[in-house]
Image (cartoon, rainbow, N blue to C red):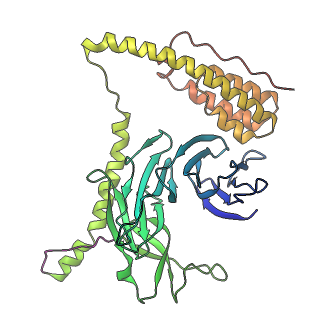
Amino acid sequence: RDFTVASLGKNGAVFGTEGQEDNENAPSILHFRPLDAWARDAGWSATLPPGERVQVVCAGDDFVAACTSRDLIRIYSTGGVEDAVVASLGPVVACAAHGKYLAVAYHGGIPDGEGRQHVQVQVLDVESRQTLNGNGTRLPLQPGCLLTWLAFKSDDGVLLASDSQGSFWLLVDDFGHRWAPALDAATTRHNIGDREWPVYAKHGSVHCCVLKGGLTQPQCRGARPVLDALPLRLPHASSARDAAQRRAEAGLGAPTTLARQRARLAGAAGVLAFTRRPASDDAAKHERIARDLARAANEAILQRDRAVLRQLVAATKDGAYARAYDLARRLQLRESLDLARRIAASHGEDALTARVEDLIAVADGTTGEEDAMDEENVAPEAPKEES
């Protein structure tokens, strides 16, 4: 296969073929290959509909994303289950993933009269299906500049972007999510023709391969390219008269911004975990609403579990055990997990059965969620295998 785009994630690599738009026999294909597979056939491929082509891909910890020519974002689990298909807010330029987050850079409009690109970056929480910064935050690209790199810092998950002038930007939630200047790499170059090829960012530095002699990309043959660590430094405009004090202040800006952002990221988990309780005079109303919602939710969950179990039977029958395990993780009811274990055991797949039993053990160790459901929970019937 002639792969045209690829991305390496923590748990696997995703590849995409462009295909031929006018040839139904040469469709665009998305392929995922896990790094550590417990199932015999854990890799998978997805064929896009005719006329739709893979343009940008990235791999998160537990998901794979593909942005296509029809301005669609397709999100898959690492087992190959398509979790979401949504429209992007514009033609996608690049994307990046870290943990449960997906950053998508897209054209928010046409360039202005000075040639300034209108590129927005939106951060999605794939797990909760929410956005962190609304419709996105516009990159402060200068006239004639292009977005050249988009990535999360590997240690704390803070988003970084760089442009063709060598400017690096840090996405912070100050003032409702803004880009903060993090590094002007042009000021660190020894030669005018030098350029930076960013590889990753960690511990307050961007690790780059410095391209010399007009090269546009590192040489892949021969010795492994040497990476230089460029410390993040804000463009400082100090009022201090002493040169040593100005240098000290210049080295303080980026670490301070990073520390503030890390503290807010750490505090967000506590805020999201807080549950708001109703006042005493609203208790009866809230109880009635909660009971009605629980009854409706229970019925929806029953129907969804039945549909998931039917897919699980088909996946197990085809020997797609990684996909079957992915489907089992989507089951909500305890009784549905028991049925999934019976299905796995009936096919004699010990690895799959052990993983489903682990899901059951975790479910048995949690309390509170099942109590919110209506007492009329009915386990879905085990789907019959088609002969």
In the image, residue 39 sits, relative to residue 349, either above or below, namely below
Look at 80% across and 39% down and name the residue there.
319
Magenta stretch, residue numbers: 233-241
Look at 50% across and 16% down and name the residue there.
296
Residue nearest the observer in this picture, 164 or 196: 164
Please identify the dominant SS of the magenta region: loop
In the image, residue 216 sits, relative to residue 341, either above or below, namely below
Look at 51% across and 20% down and name the residue there.
297
Residue nearest the observer in this picture, 297 or 221: 297
Return the x and y of residue 227 as percentages of the image width and height.
51, 77
Q: Going by the image, does 232 lie left or right of 316?
A: left
Which image quadrant is residue 77 in?
top right
Q: Quadrant of the N terminus?
A: bottom right
Q: Going by the image, does 257 lie left or right of 33?
A: left
Residue nearest the observer in this picture, 138 or 198: 138
Return the x and y of residue 172 as percentages of the image width and height.
33, 56
Magenta residue check for 11:
no
